[in-house]
Image (cartoon, rainbow, N blue to C red):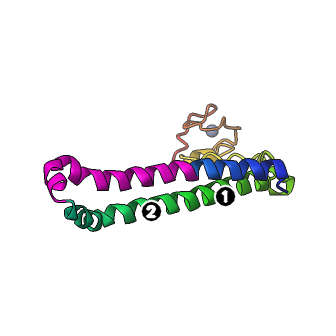
């Protein structure tokens, strides 16, 4: 819950930034009013009535400046309110994501049996001719010398 202190800090920030935006708006208004005078001061000196026209001519600057000042104030309010809200929400324990538990190690997978390339040889445990036990992968019987591979 926002405390009063934080609310006042928020309000203060909003006002300060609102004033800053107001200054920006006023600067734009003043520029709009002064720019034509600066470019042709003699004309406005000699024709005071033209200043009225100048006011209307620079109305767009007045509007832009006012809009920026107003929008800036509300933008500041929204910005700080949202920032504070996010801070509040992230401060509440239930909103913090639970610590990610390390995934349990996957069960050891049984290594796939190596593909037997020479099936006939591997299958032959004993020599079909003499019956001697054969070492795995043997091509010739070590006892009788018979070629074991089917050809
Ligand atoms: Zn043999």
Q: Earlier in the sequence, mark 1 or mark 2?
A: 2
Q: Secondary structure at mark 2?
A: helix
Question: In the image, which residues are magenta?
Answer: 18-47
Percent across and percent down for residue 10 are 71, 51
Q: Secondary structure at mark 1?
A: helix
Query: In what quadrant does ligand 1 lie?
Result: top right
Quarter in which the N terminus is drawn: bottom right
Front one among 126 and 73: 73
Q: Which residue is mark 1?
A: 82
The answer to whether residue 84 shows anywhere in this view is yes
Q: CA distance from mark 1 to mark 2?
A: 24 Å
Percent across and percent down for residue 12 are 69, 48
User: Any mark on residue 149, and which?
Assistant: none
Q: Do tag 1 and tag 2 residues touch (Cβ < 8 Å)?
A: no
Task: Identify the residue at horizontal 63%, vertical 52% (top origin).
Answer: 15
Front one among 132 and 85: 85
Instruction: Name the chief secondary structure element in magenta.
Output: helix
Q: Residues within 10 Å of mark 2 (few under 14, many from 20)?
A: some
Q: Which residue is mark 2?
A: 66
49 vs 31, left or right, is left
Mark 1: is the Cβ under 8 angstroms from ligand 1?
A: no
The answer to whether residue 32 is magenta is yes
Front one among 31 and 73: 31
Q: Residues within 10 Å of mark 1 (few under 14, many from 20)?
A: few
Percent across and percent down for residue 66 are 44, 62
The answer to whether residue 29 is magenta is yes
Percent across and percent down for residue 122 are 62, 45
Task: Identify the residue at horizontal 78%, vertical 45% (top origin).
Answer: 102
Which one is closest to the eye, mark 1 or mark 2?
2
Front one among 145 and 6: 6
Task: Identify the residue at horizontal 77%, vertical 56% (top origin).
Answer: 89
């Amino acid at each position: 819950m926002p405390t009063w202190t934080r609310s006042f800090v928020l309000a203060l920030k909003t006002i300060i930034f609102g004033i800053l935006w107001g200054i920006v708006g006023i600067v734009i208004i003043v520029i709009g009013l002064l720019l034509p005078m600066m470019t042709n001061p003699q004309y406005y000196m000699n024709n005071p009535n033209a200043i009225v026209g100048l006011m209307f001519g620079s109305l767009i600057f007045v509007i832009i400046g006012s809009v920026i000042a107003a929008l800036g104030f509300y933008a500041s309010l929204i910005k700080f309110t949202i920032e504070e809200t996010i801070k509040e929400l992230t401060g509440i324990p239930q909103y913090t994501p639970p610590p990610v538990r390390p995934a349990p190690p996957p069960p050891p997978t049984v290594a796939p049996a190596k593909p037997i390339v020479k099936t006939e040889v591997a299958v032959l445990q004993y020599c079909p001719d003499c019956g001697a036990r054969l070492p795995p992968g043997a091509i010739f019987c070590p006892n009788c010398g018979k070629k074991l591979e089917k050809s």
